[in-house]
Structure formats: C-alpha cells, structure tokens
Amino acid sequence: MPKVEVPGYGSFDTSKGTKLVLALEDNGIDILHRCGGKAKCTTCRVEVHEGTFEPRGEAEKAKSLEENCRLSCQVSVQSDVKVTPKMTVSSSGMDPGPRPEK
C-alpha cells in the first residue's frame, strides 16, 4: 500500500489507485473541494514535496498551476507521496464542498 505523508498531520497508508482528495479526507485532513472533484475551483490543490502522480490532464493544464502543485481531485495515489494541502476547512473557515466521487 502506498504511504501518504502530510507535514503537520502525519502519514497513512491508502489503497493504490485511491483519488488523493478522498485519501486525505478519509484520513482526517480537512481539505477543501468546493466543486466536488470537477477540477473547476482549485481549492483541493496540494503542493507535492516527494513522489509523482500521473501526467496532468487537460483539466489541470487549463488551471495554470505551479509546477509542484496538483489538484488532488484529479490524481490517484500509485506510490508513496508527500504533499501539503494549500487550503483546508480549518484555515479558510469555508464549507468543504460536496464529496468528490471515486
């Protein structure tokens, strides 16, 4: 099982192929996902410190993200990674948004 490390929150194992946003949320990290995983709002973006994800799809390319950032609703965990959510419920005071689909 791949390990996801999140500075300030710890680390956890998740099933290979799990959408990153769901892995984070299911392990107690209050990441925002205001558009419900449709790659429209960018609130679920994470900074990638270690590890890799699949190449960027058109939805991510259209968002002009920083090179080391990804939308957690658009990537799945395939191997060990270390990421930091850029926006959380607790840091923003916003409602997380609808739960993204698997």
Image (cartoon, rainbow, N blue to C red):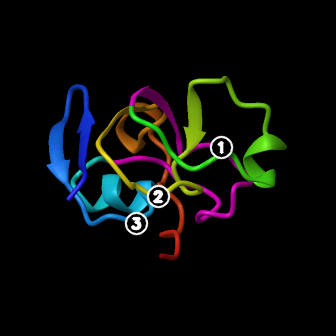
The range drawn in magenta is 30-50
Q: Residue at label 2?
A: 76
The residue closer to the viewer here, 102 or 31, is 102
Q: Quadrant for residue 20, please give it.
A: bottom left
Is 7 in the magenta?
no
Vertical position of residue 9 compared to residue 2: above or below = above
The answer for how far apart the CA atoms under marks 2 and 3 are is: 5 Å
Residue 1 at what x, y percent from top left? Answer: 20, 59
Is 41 in the magenta?
yes
Q: Residue at label 1?
A: 42
Q: Residue at label 3?
A: 17
Residue 101 at what x, y percent from top left? Answer: 52, 76
- Earlier-in-chain disc, 1 versus 3: 3
Q: Residue at x 53, y 61 (%)?
A: 97
| Image depth: mark 1 or mark 3 in front | 3
- Earlier-in-chain disc, 2 versus 3: 3
Q: Quadrant for residue 65, please give it.
A: top right
